[in-house]
Amino acid sequence: MENPSDKPPAGWESLPSWLLTQTANHAHRLVADGFSSVSARGYHYRLLATLEEFGPASQATLGRRSGIHVSDMVATINELAERNLVERAPDPSDRRRNIISLTPEGELQLRRLEKRLAETQDELLAPLSSEDRERFAELLSRLLDHHNRRTGTSEEPRH
Amino acid sequence: MENPSDKPPAGWESLPSWLLTQTANHAHRLVADGFSSVSARGYHYRLLATLEEFGPASQATLGRRSGIHVSDMVATINELAERNLVERAPDPSDRRRNIISLTPEGELQLRRLEKRLAETQDELLAPLSSEDRERFAELLSRLLDHHNRRTGTSEEPRH
DNA sequence: TCACAATCATTGGTGCTCCCAACGATTCGT
DNA sequence: ACGAATCGTTGGGAGCACCAATGATTGTGA
């Protein structure tokens, strides 16, 4: 965004899709700023959090769990492994797979990221009351759920 | 995949910033799909709508009005001008400037984009009642306003 | 009036997120 | 045993937001 010095435009600025994406933009900026203060970005957090939540797993599985595309997963793991926040080891029982696991340093980093993230939530929702925040989250959840279902976000693992 | 429960993990998935950005993602996809059906993208619509709203202007002014960065404005105008949706003419009174104006074809295209956009809003808000939609928009407006003030810092152009 | 500051359009980048196609290697299903 | 499926990897692209620097032009102040 630059310099809306010329009066508030109009029309499209009141469309839900506009309000939503612009607000999300602010949210993303806030989150990204918090993360970048510890040299991380969204994907790093999502991967670390997923690892802690479900434990070590293959890259493909992690991709499904975190919603990160498998091809982006490679770079994300590279970046984290370079800093020893994550470990990439071959799976002895399936030579196609790597088993990715969280290191102690990775856990520490995750703690830091969670802290920044929590601060960010407050900053993001600053103008909203406690009840408003709840309603806001509820509305978003309803929308997100609906659209996640529609776009078949979770594929059945068949085997 | 020994664990068929590759579903919504937890924790971070309930954070407002996550709900917001992911929902915005769906919104963006819906909007983009609608736009792409007439070979356009967000910037095109924003520029065309701004032109109709305020009339012809220089690229820098359009950038301020639409929130499109001036350096992205160049490409956006190039793309629209190539299809005769917009006209780029030198400003006789200031040889630094171009005056950008909407062509009749541009207006037609704008009508098409508005139509797609209107359809998209309904798709986006499908699971919400009329009252919910209103509350949703109101909450988003409050947030957006707050953060625009904090960030957008619109300074007056020194005459 | 003349030098300096500011503005304008343009170029050529960056970063993040999401997404796609194709590849060799490996394992599974039948 | 053979074809189908899965895994990691590479190397892209789209879209949005943002930044720095440049040459041309215009404005301003001393």
Image (cartoon, coloured by chain):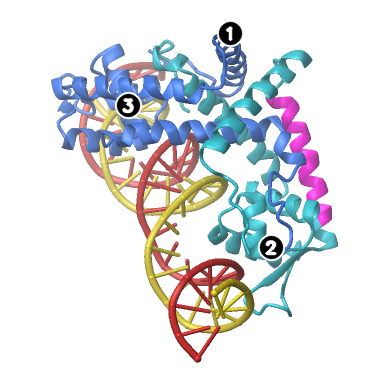
Chain colours: A cyan, B blue, C yellow, D red
Q: Which residue is labeled 1 in the image? A: B131
Between disc 3 and disc 1, whose residue precedes?
3
If the image is split into quadrants, where does the C terminus of chain A sit?
bottom right
> In terms of secondary structure, what is the magenta stretch mainly?
helix
Residue at 48% from the left image edge and 28% from the top image edge: A1
Q: Name the spot of residue C2 as percent of width and height, x first.
A: 27, 29
Residue A120 on the magenta segment: yes
Q: Which residue is labeled 2 in the image? A: B1
Q: Name the spot of residue B56 as percent of width and height, x first.
A: 23, 17
Between disc 2 and disc 3, whose residue precedes?
2
Chain letter of disc 1? B
Give the structural element (helix, strand or loop) at label 1.
helix
Give the structural element (helix, strand or loop) at label 3.
helix
Q: In this view, does A43 lie to the left or right of C15?
A: right
Query: Which amino acid lies under the numbered mark 3 shown in the image of this protein?
Result: Tyr
Give the structural element (helix, strand or loop) at label 2.
loop
Chain letter of disc 2? B
Marks 3 and 1 share the same chain:
yes
Chain letter of disc 3? B
Q: In this view, does B60 lie to the left or right of B85?
A: right
Query: Which amino acid lies under the numbered mark 1 shown in the image of this protein?
Result: Glu
Q: Give the range drawn in magenta.
A: A107-124
Measure the alpha-carbon separation of dots 2 and 3.
44 Å
Marks 2 and 1 share the same chain:
yes
Residue A23 on the magenta segment: no
Vertical order, B30 against A74 (above or below): above
Q: Is residue A27 left or right of residue B119?
A: right
Q: Can residue B59 be seen in this view?
A: yes
Image disc number at residue B157? none
Q: Which residue is labeled 3 in the image? A: B45
**Cβ–Cβ under 8 Å for marks 3 and 1:** no
